[in-house]
Image (spheres, rainbow, N blue to C red):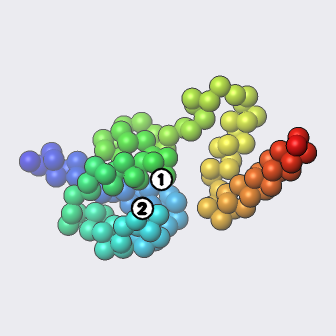
Amino acid sequence: MEKQNLEDNERRQRLKDIRLSKKLKQKDFGKKLGLSLSQISSYETGHRKIPQRTINDICREFNVNEQWLLHGEGEMFVDITEDLETSEEIKTMIKKIFALEDEDREAIEKIIDNAYLKIKNEEL
């Protein structure tokens, strides 16, 4: 039982570490996951256990390594480029984009979308 409590405490701290690494307040972190501030707070304080669905959502939304979140094993974030068969230059560019704040990443996405549409329109 004591080991389980220690694991739960560490998991709660890792949840908070993810949120803080993204520089998000509990309210904003919860909003990205479709959860309320009180739900995030209750997970971080240990008043409620983090459900598996929420763990899945956190891992998907923030590119978090599930083994790290659950057990502290491996790196906090999944290397999204490790499965890509592409050049190192492209991998570096993708890593830089994912390191940006959401607002900056969205601006870059719009630039890429506009450039792509321009190319597609020229092909027609």
Residue at the image point whose x is 30% and y is 64% from the top: 44
Q: Residue 24 at x, y = what percent? A: 49, 67
Is label 2 in contact with label 1 (beta carbons under 8 Å)? Answer: yes
Residue at the image point whose x is 21% and y is 63% from the top: 48
Q: Is residue 13 left or right of residue 96?
A: left
Which residue is tagged 2? Answer: 33
Q: How many marks?
A: 2
Say if residue 104 shows up in the picture: yes
**Amino acid, disc 1:** Glu
Secondary structure of the residue carrying tag 1 is helix
Residue at the image point whose x is 43% and y is 41% from the top: 65
Q: Is residue 23 left or right of residue 96?
A: left
Gap in angstroms between the C-alphas marked 2 and 1: 7 Å
For disc 2, the neighbor class at 10 Å (few under 14, some 14 to 19, many from 20) is some
Figure quadrant of residue 46 = bottom left
Which residue is tagged 1? Answer: 61
Q: Is residue 95 left or right of residue 3?
A: right
Q: Farthest residue in the left direction?
A: 1
Q: Farthest residue in the right direction?
A: 122
Figure quadrant of residue 9 = bottom left
Say if residue 119 shows up in the picture: no
Q: Residue 55 at x, y = what percent? A: 34, 51
Secondary structure of the residue carrying tag 2 is helix
Up the image or down, 49 lies above or below 95; here it is: below
Q: Nearer the viewer, residue 10 or 118?
A: 118
Q: Mark 2 vs mark 1: which is more N-terminal?
A: 2
The C terminus appears in which quarter of the rendering? top right
Residue at the image point whose x is 70% and y is 28% from the top: 86
Q: Residue 36 at x, y = what percent? A: 36, 72
